[in-house]
């Protein structure tokens, strides 16, 4: 399995999610199943079916998070402060002159709404190893565009 790049915060959040799923969520689903089984005919019991589906989802997510954490590679302080690396926050100038700031993280931690983009995304890939002042061409599904790297921290 390939390495999963995570910040220390991302690792902590996944560990907390795993603890929650293994403890409180499993117990909650087990209680729902128990109550649904006491509700009569299991074949016609919609609550039982819903609880079984939720149980399958929870167990699947537990396995997924366990695999992510097992393959995790924690992103430390950037090795080269003069070029963009996973874990860096990059300030860009877009084609229209506006500025945007993104933190490059691993795919498991990406959340564009929070300004966290994956190192595997078109923009993330294009920015890796670039330096302030570089103009970067990005081939994205919505079409190609260019950005200028202003600074990296």
Image (cartoon, grey):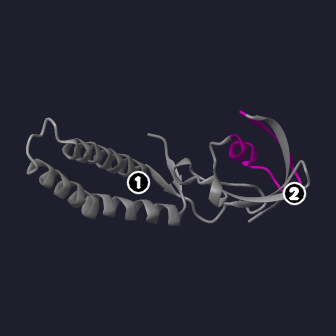
Q: Position of residue 89 (x, y in %)?
A: 71, 62
Count of numbered marks: 2
Q: Residue furthest right?
A: 97
Q: Which residue is mark 2?
A: 98
Read off the magenta span: 122-141
Please tell me in which quadrant of the rendered image residue 116 appears.
bottom right
Does the stretch in magenta take in 139? yes
Tell me which residue sits at (74%, 43%) in the image: 126
Q: Is residue 120 found left or right of 89 in the rendered image?
A: left
Q: Quadrant of the C terminus?
A: bottom right
Front residue of this view, candidates 68 and 115: 115
Q: Quadrant of the N terminus?
A: top left
Q: Is residue 114 found left or right of 27 in the rendered image?
A: right
Front residue of this view, candidates 20 and 10: 20
Mark number displayed over residue 27: none
**Front: mark 1 or 2:** 2
Front residue of this view, candidates 43 and 78: 43
Q: Which residue is mark 1?
A: 69
Task: Check disc 2 and report its element: helix, strand or loop.
Answer: loop
Q: Position of residue 30 (x, y in %)?
A: 18, 55
Tell me which residue sits at (65%, 42%) in the image: 121
Q: Position of residue 118 (x, y in %)?
A: 62, 48
Task: Check disc 1 and report its element: helix, strand or loop.
Answer: helix
Q: Residues within 10 Å of mark 2 (few under 14, many from 20)?
A: few
Tell me which residue sits at (32%, 51%) in the image: 62
């Amino acid at each position: 399995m390939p390495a999963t790049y995570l910040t220390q915060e991302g690792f902590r959040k996944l560990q907390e999610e795993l603890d929650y799923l293994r403890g409180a969520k499993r117990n909650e689903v087990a209680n729902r199943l128990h109550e649904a089984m006491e509700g009569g005919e299991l074949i016609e019991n919609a609550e039982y079916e819903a609880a079984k589906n939720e149980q399958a989802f929870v167990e699947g997510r537990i396995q997924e998070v366990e695999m992510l954490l097992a393959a995790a590679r924690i992103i430390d302080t950037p090795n080269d402060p003069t070029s963009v690396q996973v874990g860096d926050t990059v300030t860009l100038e877009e084609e229209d002159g506006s500025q945007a700031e993104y933190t490059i993280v691993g795919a498991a931690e990406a959340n564009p709404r929070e300004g966290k983009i994956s190192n595997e995304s078109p923009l993330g890939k294009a920015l890796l190893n670039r330096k302030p002042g570089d103009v970067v061409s990005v081939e994205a599904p919505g079409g190609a565009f260019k950005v200028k790297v202003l600074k990296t921290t």
